[in-house]
Image (spheres, rainbow, N blue to C red):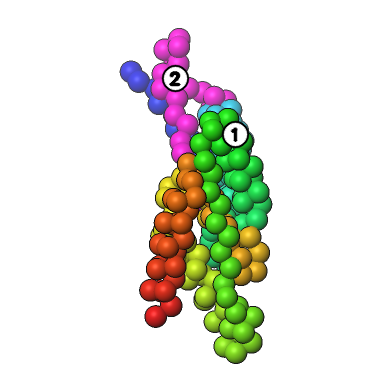
Amino acid sequence: TKSIVGVPLKSGDKVFGVIELINRLDGSSFSALDLKTLMAIADFAAIAIECGYYFHSLGRLAMLDPLTGIGNRRALERGLAREVEASRRSGNPLGVLFVDVDRFKQINDRFGHLSGDGVLKAVAESLQQVARRADLVARYGGDEFLMVLPNTGPKGAQRVKARIESAVAVSSK
């Protein structure tokens, strides 16, 4: 006969999985002590899983600009350093575009900060749409953004610049 014992990996009201024991090596049934031990292990495992989840989430949030949802300056500094090193090693070009919103202070002063926030979000979205998967798009600060373009020389960067200008013009209409 099969002997099966299952205990949920649960923390609060969240279930992360199940630990299941099937058959003891000696063929006997699981005892109350076995179940109690399994429950203790499951409790600690659930706490560890939950902590890992939150740690990962916090690390991710620490790299995102809260307004635009793109990389923040910390993500930019790390990503740029990584790409500069990769470019040095490989000899491949690395393009960097600096994007600044013209007359941003006037937008905030005339239409209010909520409108200014909307402009920043729209610019970030346009940059994301133009970017390739390998590119890094980040908010440098205020109304300034950077795009890091691996394996992109001056002509390629000019093409990306033209696509950005086109995308921003379309989104501002």
Name the residue nearer the viewer: 16 or 58.
Answer: 58
Look at the image and tell me in which quarter the C terminus lies: bottom left
| Mark 2 surroundings within 10 Å by alpha-carbon count, few (fewer than 14), some (14 through 19), many (20 or more) | some
**Which portion, as a residue range, is magenta?**
11-34
Q: Is residue 117 above or below residue 146?
A: below
Residue at (48%, 71%) from the top-left corner? Answer: 122
Rendered location of residue 28, percent (x, y) = 44, 15
On the rendered structure, is 126 left or right of 11? left
Residue 19 sits inside the magenta stretch: yes
Rendered location of residue 94, percent (x, y) = 54, 44
Rendered location of residue 165, percent (x, y) = 44, 68
Q: Which mark is residue 113?
A: none
Confirm whether residue 147 shows in the render: yes
Residue at (46%, 36%) from the top-left corner? Answer: 18
* Residue reaching furthest to the left: 1
Name the residue nearer the viewer: 57 or 72.
Answer: 72
Mark 1 or 2: in front is 1
Q: Is the C-beta separation of discs 1 and 2 under 8 Å?
A: no
Query: Of helix, strand and loop, which one carries label 1?
Result: helix
The three-letter amino acid code for the residue at tag 2 is Ser
Q: Is residue 91 above or below residue 161?
A: above
Cα distance, mark 1 to mark 2?
A: 63 Å
Rendered location of residue 118, percent (x, y) = 52, 76
Name the residue nearer the viewer: 125 or 9.
Answer: 125
On the rendered structure, is 159 left or right of 94? left
Q: Which mark is residue 88?
A: 1
* Residue reaching furthest to the top: 26
Q: Quick one: label 1 or label 2, which is nearer the N terminus?
A: 2
Q: Which residue is mark 2?
A: 29
The three-letter amino acid code for the residue at tag 1 is Arg
